[in-house]
Image (cartoon, rainbow, N blue to C red):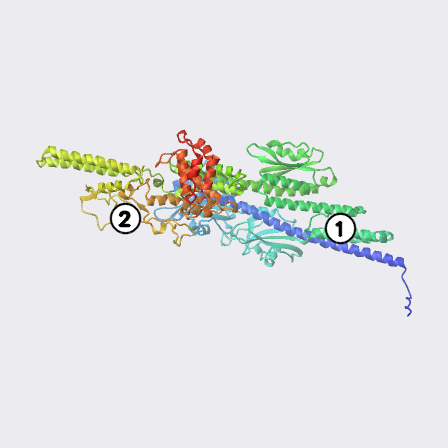
């Protein structure tokens, strides 16, 4: 065996062990220091990126809150009479409406209307000192109306009108130099060819010099553009308070690099040296080198954090895409100095190195024994740090307690930080997903207590009507908290909370306008962590998320109530439009909701699975209220047509006058016969017989005009015979006509007949036919290329047929085919009107539910000839209750109200004929919902005995009968 060469000098084992321990400890210390450095640096930088994104979301949300009230006001003002007024006095008569919109929407700085002839009207609130000074407003003036009108000479005339808080005129001041032409403005041009709300690009307002945007919308008549100005001052103020560090810089810029928002908004407009007063500063003109460098480096706006040098300092910045204002491509620039972000991290690294060296020297004798244990503990801490750096904030459930106090304390701190971060993420998730404020408050409060490691808490919401705070949610220990507090106690709540031995903290929850939204009260242990000022600062920052969520949900609820109110107002307006159908649009939704609610209680039968969630029920309710909204376009004289000859008046009076003429002619013929020497008795006999026949004929014509019973073919032939009688017309029938009627009369004959002219007693004249205007011809036929809605209706040859015999010969009711189409067109307009509205996802079926109630199960309905399998249960419900209400209504001019048994029998026959859903009708009868409705809306004479079983047999479809 070969001999191993001997080493001349061997190290003593204690030095080797000591050296290994020292090296291992040094290595561990270096590794831990490095990991801590990079982990802490990564966490700080990742938090900076997260804060930047949160800042973008906050600013975007604030931008949306700036524009949403203006857009809502536009949709209301687009239907206001001010858009159709042609005279200045008529426009000024609507000043109270405009002033109310300004008062209720403080974010809107001005409302203006541009007319197609160049006229212009603008109303603004004089609520700022600089604006009052600019317009030299009288002390008592609260509103300014700027007017441009065009006289007969076509020249614009400027005028300023100042009004007080009661909207009374204070000062009328002509402004000859005020020659504003709205038709040249982008907001007018952009909204002219669309029915949607148009948002202008940011610019400097002409009169006030504020930076803002203009929302504009085409008026319902198409003759004007209504717009609102929304100043962006709030965005600039918001940016000033959202910096991550004291030296951080934020700016909102457009895609071309122009600055839209900055903490000092006064720096933005350029008004000197002949530069366009509507222009904005470019980013490099601000003189903020860090922002300029960031824009040039990250202009793409992909949101990535970039590092760069600027002004001798290292910066981290990001250009975040900003979608706070719809239709605008903008970026939110956020930059912060690295040294401020990292703070004392570098100094702490040096300290840790020195401390590690000292510890190595001190614990060298024990290094070997505790080295492995310490290494294991540090590895666990490092692993937890890495999990935090990788956004894993879940605490380790299998972690064993360490015998080293510092290690265990550090583990506990890491667990607490991880728990707080996890609770904060849960709060963010709940705030973004839970729509109901009560549920949201309960869940957020529970996570809030966990995040702050408190023992309990409560949230109070401010009730403006009661002027008090009411407890809305509570969790954990309450410590004697009351259910309600008065308004006077709100301000004293934080101070009063400190009187509980330092175990309770109260935080006000103000809204964006500094108005109180509520109060958060936390109860906690009396320990060092909760006694530190940092805890109160941390909890107070978290409350901002809760305040924003409460305000946002209250705003959403207010908008929902506004939509509900507008829907009811529209329904009431339709009912008020006709004295004969008043209440229809109110009774149908009440009966429909009553029936749907009953169906949802079923646990067996065909409707055991019928269920409407909250969104579906809201959509169904709105659809029921809006099912006849298209009637706003229906001519009233057709909707209220009580007789066959009625247009805007009952033409039976005109025909009666012709009979009067023939009566007079009979008298004259008798007298002429006597003058000619004929036998007076014979002449009088002929006269009496002729007059008696005229009486009988007129009574027959008048009876036909009523339209009460079905008209037989024999009656139609008699009408034709009566109509062949003639009378002499001595006056020109072309005089006194409007332009269209005159054109129809001229087109129906080669020239005026010689007078006197022979006229028939009853006639269908060519000029009685009113053709379709091609520009207004309804696109309802299946093969019409303009029909994009899927309508399938037969269009009458003429828009109107006023022929006297044509109308008198109607065999049932009082409506001609042309009249019937004009009435049926209301459902076409209902569908088009509702489809054009920007419904949110949970309401997107409102147009379908509302517009399908005239479809039939057999596909023979209108306007789209849908079959039963294409109709949902909600559509079938509205179709059924619409028929029931129409049959039992007591306010129809063309029929007497029917009893319950008569109405249900008719509906049974409609089921048998494929009109209504037989299964739903069977449920309707057996549920006796109709009985509840009858007690509320029908007269006692209509409520009779109903044989449900007989009606059920009568309702069986023909195939199964």
The picture places residue 792, in percent across and down from the top left corner, at 40, 50
Residue 161 seen in the figure: no
Q: Residue furthest front?
A: 961
- Report crowding for label 2: few under 14, some 14 to 19, many 20 or more residues within 10 A (C-alpha): some
| Separation of marks 2 and 1 at Cα, in angstroms | 95 Å
| Image mark for residue 693 | none
Ranked by sequence position, the earlier of labels 2 and 1 is: 1
Q: Residue furthest bottom?
A: 2
- Taking the spot 91% from the left edge, 64% from the top edge, the residue there is 9
- Taking the spot 70% from the left edge, 51% from the top edge, the residue there is 388
Q: Residue furthest top?
A: 940
Q: Which residue is mark 2?
A: 744
Give the vertical position of 27 relative to 546 (above or below): below
- Report crowding for label 1: few under 14, some 14 to 19, many 20 or more residues within 10 A (C-alpha): some
Residue 200 seen in the figure: yes
The picture places residue 209, in percent across and down from the top left corner, at 51, 48
Q: Secondary structure at mark 1?
A: helix
The picture places residue 821, in percent across and down from the top left corner, at 36, 45
Count up the numbered dots.
2
């Amino acid at each position: 065996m070969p001999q191993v060469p001997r080493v001349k000098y061997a190290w003593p084992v204690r030095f080797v062990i000591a050296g290994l321990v020292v090296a291992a400890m040094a290595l561990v210390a270096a590794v831990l220091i490095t990991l801590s450095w990079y982990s802490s640096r990564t966490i700080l930088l990742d938090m900076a990126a997260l804060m930047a994104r949160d800042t973008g979301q906050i600013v975007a949300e604030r931008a949306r809150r700036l524009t949403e009230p203006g857009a809502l006001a536009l949709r209301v003002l687009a239907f206001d009479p001010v858009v159709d007024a042609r005279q200045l006095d008529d426009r000024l008569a609507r000043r109270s409406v405009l002033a109310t919109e300004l008062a209720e929407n403080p974010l809107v700085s001005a409302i203006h209307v541009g007319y197609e002839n160049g006229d212009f009207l603008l109303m603004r609130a004089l609520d700022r000192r600089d604006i009052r000074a600019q317009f030299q407003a009288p002390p008592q003036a609260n509103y300014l109306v700027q007017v441009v009108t065009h006289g007969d000479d076509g020249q614009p005339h400027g005028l300023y009108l100042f009004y007080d808080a009661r909207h009374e005129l204070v000062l009328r001041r002509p402004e000859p130099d005020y020659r504003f032409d709205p038709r040249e403005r982008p907001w007018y041009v952009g909204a002219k060819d669309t029915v949607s709300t148009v948002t202008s690009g940011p610019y400097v307002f002409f009169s006030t010099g504020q930076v803002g945007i203009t929302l504009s919308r085409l008026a319902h008549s198409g003759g004007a553009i209504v717009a609102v100005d929304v100043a962006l001052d709030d965005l600039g103020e918001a940016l000033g308070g959202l910096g991550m560090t004291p030296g951080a810089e934020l700016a909102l810029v457009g895609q071309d690099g122009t600055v839209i928002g900055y903490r000092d908004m006064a720096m933005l407009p350029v008004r000197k040296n002949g530069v366009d007063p509507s222009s904005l500063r470019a980013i490099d003109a601000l003189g903020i080198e860090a922002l300029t460098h960031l824009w040039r480096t990250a202009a793409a706006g992909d949101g990535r954090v970039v590092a760069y040098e600027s002004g001798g300092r290292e910066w981290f910045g990001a250009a975040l895409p900003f979608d706070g204002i719809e239709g605008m491509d903008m970026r939110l620039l956020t930059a912060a100095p690295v040294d401020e972000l990292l703070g004392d991290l570098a100094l702490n690294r040096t300290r840790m190195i020195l401390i590690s060296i000292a510890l190595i020297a001190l614990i060298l004798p024990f290094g070997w024994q505790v080295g492995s244990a310490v290494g294991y503990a540090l590895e666990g801490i490092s692993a937890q740090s890495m999990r935090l750096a990788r956004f894993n904030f879940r605490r380790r459930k299998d972690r064993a307690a360490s015998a080293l106090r510092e290690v265990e304390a550090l583990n506990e701190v890491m667990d607490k930080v991880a728990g707080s971060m996890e609770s904060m993420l849960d709060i963010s998730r709940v705030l973004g997903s839970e729509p109901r404020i009560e549920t949201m408050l309960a869940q957020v409060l529970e996570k809030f207590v966990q995040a702050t490691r408190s023992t309990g808490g409560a949230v109070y919401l401010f009730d403006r009507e009661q002027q008090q705070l009411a407890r809305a949610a509570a969790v954990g220990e309450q410590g004697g908290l009351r259910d309600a507090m008065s308004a006077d106690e709100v301000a004293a709540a934080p101070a009063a909370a400190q009187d509980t031995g330092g175990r309770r903290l109260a935080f006000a929850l103000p809204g964006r306008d500094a108005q109180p939204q509520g109060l958060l009260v936390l109860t906690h242990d009396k320990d060092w962590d909760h006694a530190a000022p940092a805890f109160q600062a941390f909890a107070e920052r978290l409350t901002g998320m809760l305040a924003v969520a409460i305000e946002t949900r209250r705003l959403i609820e207010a908008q929902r109530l506004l939509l509900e109110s507008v829907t009811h107002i529209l329904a009431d307006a339709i009912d008020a439009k006709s004295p004969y159908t008043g209440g229809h649009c109110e009774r149908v939704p009440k009966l429909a909701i009553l029936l749907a609610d009953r169906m949802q209680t079923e646990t067996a039968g065909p409707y055991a699975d019928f269920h409407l969630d909250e969104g579906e029920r809201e959509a169904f309710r709105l659809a029921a209220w809006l099912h006849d909204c298209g009637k706003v376009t229906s001519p009233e004289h057709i909707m209220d047509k009580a007789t066959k000859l009625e247009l805007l008046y009952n033409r039976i009076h005109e025909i009666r006058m012709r009979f009067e003429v023939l009566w007079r002619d009979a008298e004259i013929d008798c007298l002429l016969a006597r003058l000619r020497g004929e036998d007076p008795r014979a002449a009088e006999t002929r006269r009496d017989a002729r007059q008696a026949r005229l009486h009988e004929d007129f009574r027959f014509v008048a009876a036909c005009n009523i339209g009460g019973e079905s008209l037989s073919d024999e009656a139609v032939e008699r009408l034709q015979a009566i109509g062949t009688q003639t009378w002499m017309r001595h006056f020109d029938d072309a005089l006194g006509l409007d332009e269209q009627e005159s054109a129809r009369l001229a087109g129906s004959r080669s020239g005026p007949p010689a007078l006197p002219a022979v006229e028939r007693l009853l006639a269908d004249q060519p000029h009685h036919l009113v053709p379709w205007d091609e520009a207004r011809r309804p696109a309802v036929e299946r093969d019409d290329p303009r029909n994009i809605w899927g309508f399938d209706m037969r269009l009458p040859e003429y828009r109107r047929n006023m022929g006297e015999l044509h109308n008198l010969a109607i065999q049932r009711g009082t409506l001609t085919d042309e009249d019937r189409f004009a009435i049926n067109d209301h459902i076409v307009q209902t569908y088009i009107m509702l489809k054009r509205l920007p419904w949110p996802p949970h309401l997107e079926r409102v147009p379908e539910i509302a517009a399908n109630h005239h479809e039939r199960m057999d596909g023979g309905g209108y306007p789209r000839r849908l079959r039963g399998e294409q109709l949902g249960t909600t559509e079938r419900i509205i179709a059924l209750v619409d028929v029931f209400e129409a049959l039992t209504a007591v306010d129809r001019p063309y029929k007497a109200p029917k009893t319950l048994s008569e109405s249900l029998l008719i509906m049974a026959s409609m089921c048998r004929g494929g009109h209504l859903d037989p299964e739903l009708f069977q449920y309707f009868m057996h549920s006796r919902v109709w009985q509840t409705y009858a007690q509320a809306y029908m007269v006692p004479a209509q409520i009779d005995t109903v044989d449900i079983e007989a009606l059920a047999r009568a309702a069986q479809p023909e195939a199964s009968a």
